[in-house]
Amino acid sequence: MSESSDQIRSEMVAGMIDTGRKPNRRQGTDTRTGAELSDFCRRLVTRRSDPIGTGRAAQFTQAYQTLTAEQRGFFFDRLLEDYAPDSDRIIAAARAYKENPGFKTHRSLAKAVEAPRQNLFRSINMAPGGTSTLVKMRQHMLELSMPQRVRLRAVEHDLKEVLRSWFHRGFLHLRRVDWDSPASLLEKIITYEAVHQIQTFEDLRRRLEADRRCFAFFHPSMPHEPLVFVEIALTQGLAREIQPLLARDSQVAGGRDIDTAMFYSINNCQTGLRGISFGGFLIKQVVQELRQELPQLTTFATLSPVPGFQSWLGQQSEGSVSASPIGRQAMRTRQELQQHGDWYRNAEVQQSLQLPLLRLCAHYLLHEKLDGWPIDAVARFHLGNGASLQHMNWLADTSPRGLAQSAGMMVNYVYDLGRIEKRHDQYINKGEVSVSEVIRQLAAELAEGQE
Amino acid sequence: MSESSDQIRSEMVAGMIDTGRKPNRRQGTDTRTGAELSDFCRRLVTRRSDPIGTGRAAQFTQAYQTLTAEQRGFFFDRLLEDYAPDSDRIIAAARAYKENPGFKTHRSLAKAVEAPRQNLFRSINMAPGGTSTLVKMRQHMLELSMPQRVRLRAVEHDLKEVLRSWFHRGFLHLRRVDWDSPASLLEKIITYEAVHQIQTFEDLRRRLEADRRCFAFFHPSMPHEPLVFVEIALTQGLAREIQPLLARDSQVAGGRDIDTAMFYSINNCQTGLRGISFGGFLIKQVVQELRQELPQLTTFATLSPVPGFQSWLGQQSEGSVSASPIGRQAMRTRQELQQHGDWYRNAEVQQSLQLPLLRLCAHYLLHEKLDGWPIDAVARFHLGNGASLQHMNWLADTSPRGLAQSAGMMVNYVYDLGRIEKRHDQYINKGEVSVSEVIRQLAAELAEGQE
Amino acid sequence: MSESSDQIRSEMVAGMIDTGRKPNRRQGTDTRTGAELSDFCRRLVTRRSDPIGTGRAAQFTQAYQTLTAEQRGFFFDRLLEDYAPDSDRIIAAARAYKENPGFKTHRSLAKAVEAPRQNLFRSINMAPGGTSTLVKMRQHMLELSMPQRVRLRAVEHDLKEVLRSWFHRGFLHLRRVDWDSPASLLEKIITYEAVHQIQTFEDLRRRLEADRRCFAFFHPSMPHEPLVFVEIALTQGLAREIQPLLARDSQVAGGRDIDTAMFYSINNCQTGLRGISFGGFLIKQVVQELRQELPQLTTFATLSPVPGFQSWLGQQSEGSVSASPIGRQAMRTRQELQQHGDWYRNAEVQQSLQLPLLRLCAHYLLHEKLDGWPIDAVARFHLGNGASLQHMNWLADTSPRGLAQSAGMMVNYVYDLGRIEKRHDQYINKGEVSVSEVIRQLAAELAEGQE
Amino acid sequence: MSESSDQIRSEMVAGMIDTGRKPNRRQGTDTRTGAELSDFCRRLVTRRSDPIGTGRAAQFTQAYQTLTAEQRGFFFDRLLEDYAPDSDRIIAAARAYKENPGFKTHRSLAKAVEAPRQNLFRSINMAPGGTSTLVKMRQHMLELSMPQRVRLRAVEHDLKEVLRSWFHRGFLHLRRVDWDSPASLLEKIITYEAVHQIQTFEDLRRRLEADRRCFAFFHPSMPHEPLVFVEIALTQGLAREIQPLLARDSQVAGGRDIDTAMFYSINNCQTGLRGISFGGFLIKQVVQELRQELPQLTTFATLSPVPGFQSWLGQQSEGSVSASPIGRQAMRTRQELQQHGDWYRNAEVQQSLQLPLLRLCAHYLLHEKLDGWPIDAVARFHLGNGASLQHMNWLADTSPRGLAQSAGMMVNYVYDLGRIEKRHDQYINKGEVSVSEVIRQLAAELAEGQE
């Protein structure tokens, strides 16, 4: 770190400590005044059209990287207080607009409304690596304790809006990831894979063989950092179970018989971009890439978990909810699950649980909503993309996580390009989801109290 | 153009024609209703998180390219009227904010204030080539007749703001342009060079020899389109005249004697990005590149025109202005210039004009202001960047343009990296400009009425 | 040039001057002894497995570039005399082989036979730019006066063999040349185009429009130097005239009607690689590229000159040759051509010449041979590649060169991929050429004395 | 595999089986005649200037890949017999040369001497992947049983000569290998590392950290296949022990203290290029790269095994050799080594062995020769490159291999760029090796019989 960034770091930290507004001022630390910090930040902002700003932004990103969590907290507080929009100015501009709505009054109001920290964030972006520093900064904000997050939500929101304008779909590049990709990139894929974990390069290698595909989105300012990636298995017919796909020693499928692309894992990589969605774009662009490369493909589908199912089941077993018939059924089934730790290995128990669980799960996927959309995050994502819920697969993921979250079930969402648009419209406009008759029937049976 | 983009084009145009609000509806044209257009645009906007949107955006950009100027006018009117912010919603949100200023009310107000067309512009960006379509679209807006421009200024402003957020300094790449660059790029350099025109590739070639440099900024979404470029001559000592630098047969300077980098031409390439400034960044980054490549360089300076001088001189000769002593001096000098069409070739006339013109020009550069900044656009740019005005060069550009605009004068602005920051600050904060003693003296002489 | 390469240059030159074997020793020049030169070269050779050799090879290539033509002559003489194979050793090794033909004696003989200068050439190749220095060196040898060339033919032959082993088809890369290619490459295309000259970049540009193609072969060691390139026009039907193809303002052909690829110019670029043939490979690989890119293409043909026709016609008019009936016809026709300087503009003369010239040309192409192959170099090339002679086009090239060499005629050779192999075999094995019935008939008419 | 390559494969194999010269003709196999094979090969050769040849070469490489070891043996026999040089023609050409040595007779003799199979090999090179097929083919030849290898040595030699002309130093590219290299390349590094084995990507990763370097040579025709690579550790002072360098958890050295580059592993990757040496070039070019990147480096040295030491020690203990004083000392020391299986862990035994082993090893490195050069392959390589033998390190490699081959010793060869050339000359011309006084003294003590 250069002298200058050392100094800036001191300014940042010292300034925060000495503002007098913080109760946790500690004896013995740097006693320089907060004026230094505001000086520093003010200079960064005012000089945005000045290349010296580029140099200072570089010093800032270097300094930021050395901050402790506590120091970052101080810094975020400064962003909250010193770079907030000016309430009086907003109110005055709004009054002028109300009196005479027009181009100039609107522009003044828009300027007054924008928080000065948005400009500060843009200034930081001038540094080499500035974009990823800002993504990291938002990650740090999202990892704060809940009270801090609530207090700082305006800062985090402003940063998110700046990032959203930059990480626009139009700027993302799709790249295939394969065994010829840099080892440093593959290492990140290993790290970011959260759905079906990868232990070693040798594990990963199976997922990059001739019958597999992996694609990721990248942004030009972070060319070495995948934003989101998807893993695909090329199969004959729909895959209904996950473990065979993941097995390191499974046979590589031959070219001729392949007719289906199974999307079995999709992962967002950057916590700092949470809420800025890429996944839907990725799946649909990858479908187009695959159709081009492999015209023999007729089916594009996922093999997905039902990650919120067990948790929902648990909630049904508590308190007043269970007063309803569905609640009672949920409670009964859950009790049976809990009695038998290894229920899925016990043929008898397993069989007795199969139908109740399938019915409950069908109901959960179809009828349990949050703000009008499916409560299950994965269902919400795929159905919102215009996919259709086709199959429920019993004992399709017997990994510990698969059992704990989804009671071992997996489902297939099918992307039928010819119908995606219409389904997306129906979903958005009428809340209708596309689902196979069998699953609809299973949900209906539960409602009718069948056992 | 595909069937679909044909259809969209019809929707766009027909829709505009049939809204009933336009007086210039022509018989015999497409009679489909405006509903189609609004349908089209609404779909484009609502589907922004939907990759189908990518396809429709692509159809849009194809259709847009086929519009006539008149059809574009219709389209811009639609953007003005149908995608304006909702005034009532803004006023309601402002009231809520005033009653209870906080995160949520502020967020609601910000949302209400943002014009929906900004979102439409972002949707268009999903198309391949979407970014350059939007840049072109703003160019089209700026090329409208003045009454149209005034009426559509809100639309143009919104588009500018969206473009500004994307064409941020942090996303630009500096690339050297040389004789190994693609011919298609060099052809653009020839086209965009407006300061000292280039006729042919052979002309350009001299400007890319071993003692010359050319650098340009590019954006990742428009990799083949330079945004701004600068041409540099490596010389021994400051260059004080332009024609020797431009001569196709001038000798290529040797490596050892070079100590100065003369920035003799800087050009913005994209009309559609007017007002989003890159030039200052470019100069300063190029200075850093050159210092790295050629450590023997000690001076970085421009050889610049004074493009507003003659025009200012003319204004002084009109009406009441000339009542002042300076006005009278200006008038006298201008009359003499006009009497002698080829004054610069006539040794006697030339000598008698030299001192008055130098004094007037010094005064013009130092003391004539607009909104507090130098009235001369080139002076405003370089002095604002923190450069210093070092020399005035008599009969330094005797090209027709040089005589007509700058009375044949050119000036040297010097970029002294060690002082740029301080000078920039003094300029911004106190309006002080850095200027050599000789020039200051010349301006003073004029004020004192010396002849 | 560094001190060291200066010194080597002196060694090379001085050494040559002072060997005492040259009569043209001049007074006053460098007097260092030839020992220095042989020292230098010996070191270069013995150290071939030594990276220091890389450095010395670099010094050699730098020094070589500064040699005058005379100095190069001295150097080549040294290669002839000091790096010749050892005759006694060859004879001894041959004797040993004769007595006992086997692996070891054969290997010894092969070693004895190889000239040590081949090894020297390989050593030079270790330098950066070594390969192109060697290509340039062979060019220098081929540009010597005839007596010198004859004397040095062994040196030139050895260099050719080394170059042939490196410039093997398997190492060449095909690259498309278009308007996005580096200007420095396009400038070389302009320079090397010898068939139908290009004056400026603007001329060239027409040849790179959407209905044109240009491809070149490159070698990895000379990535910026095309070895051979071909220019193609995409047309509807066979092109039978050249001027419309070359006109800068000709209309760009539309995509739908195109069914033919006309190869209208093929140029070798490197004199130093003369006799190492790439053209046939280039045409056939380009045919494959075009078939892939444009499946609608049905015909691949050339529009070629008959460059030796007029020269052959002249020879027929001299001495004893003209005693034959064909000779007499040739003489008569030639006289008429010479009487009418602008015969091709005079409708009457032109018509009276048409049939005799077509017959003579058909005969020339089909029956005039050198060492069993067609005497016309272009015919030999294309027919040897397995193409078929399809059309003769009257007044198809009325440029000065076209008239002077080919009497204004051009011919179409057709590459029919399905038959190339068989035709190549028939040509190689039986000397048969593939020709259309019309042309065969024209030649027969001449033989039968028809007028 | 296409139909055509199937057919060729049949031709190749069937032809071999049916020549009648092979005793191992099996019933029931393909009965097509050898004429087919020779047909196939003859066509491949004669068409070398014919692009159809490119296609057939591609079919050949595909077919070759499917051959069994036995079928390859047949094929090599055909190369031996059908593509040998013509003995009678050689003898006739030699006679003509003897009678009249000159350009033409020499050229005829050279042509007669060259085996036709060299031309066949060049034809194969026209195929995509032809070069690596030929490298693989030579590997197959070198892996034959000894009697076969001896019989086919002429074929193998001819292939080697062709490969040597292509894999010339001037055509190789140096590339750095690091953690951003393709995983497929790193996997090859893991596979080819034979000196100090790498187990997993995680192992390899430590060897690519900030204080390590890895460089490899590549050929343009095999861009994904390293030919030779070297691993380097950047250290403070000479490294004298190997295990600390290899430990996965060793600390990464800081930038400031580094002054030494230790070459601790160099590996040839392509068995098919055995005998075509790249290692010396690689080390010296890497030294230059490192000096450029890290000017603070003052020492370039190896940490090398003495791989032939124990084997030599064993030979001294047998038969008549041991009659000499050195032989007796060797025998005694070896016996002691063998008595104590874990001698290096036993402080007493270890100490008693140290001086005798160091003396024997010094003697072995300095005075034991084969054809005049050091008998130890590693010593021969580095001393031949002009390096100097600086240190012997006791118990520097206690891995099983290190103990078994080198008795745990490692040595440092130092590359002193300023002296490499002189040392190389002394080595080549006088057989002198550069060695430190201490080591010379140790060897002398052995000769004097000290104990």
Image (spheres, coloured by chain):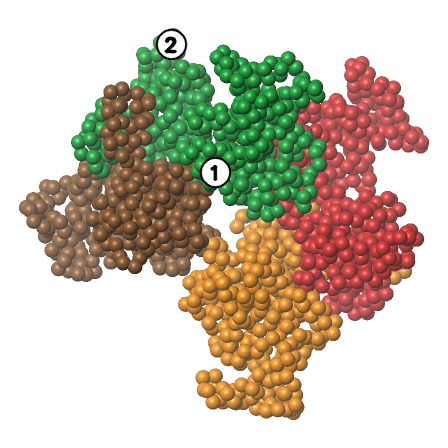
Chain colours: A orange, B red, C green, D brown
- The chain letter under disc 1 is C
Tell me where residue A25 sits by quadrant.
Answer: bottom right
**SS state under label 2:** loop
Q: Of callouts 2 and 1, which one flags the residue occurring earlier in the amino acid sequence?
A: 2
Q: On the image, numbered disc 1 is attached to which residue?
A: C423
Observer-nearest residue: D140 or B401?
D140
Considering depth in this image, is C285 or C173 the residue closer to the camera?
Answer: C285
Question: Is C77 placed above or below A355 here?
Answer: above
Asked if residue D56 is positioned above or below residue B439 in the image, the reply reads below
Residue D339: x %, y % from top left: 13, 59
Residue depicted at x 32% and y 49%: D33
Q: Residue at x 87, y 50 (%)?
A: B151
Residue C295 in sight in this render:
yes
Callout 1: SS? helix
Q: Nearer the viewer, residue C345 or D165?
A: C345
Q: Identify the residue at image location x=65%, y=90%.
A: A448
Residue, x 56% and y 72% (percent of image)? A304
What residue type is disc 2 on?
Asn
Q: Quadrant location of residue B359?
A: top right
Nearer to me, B184 or B374: B184
Along the horizontal axis of the image, is D240 left or right of A191? left
Q: What chain is tagged by disc 2?
A: C
Residue linked to disc 2: C24
Image check: C109 left or right of C178?
A: left
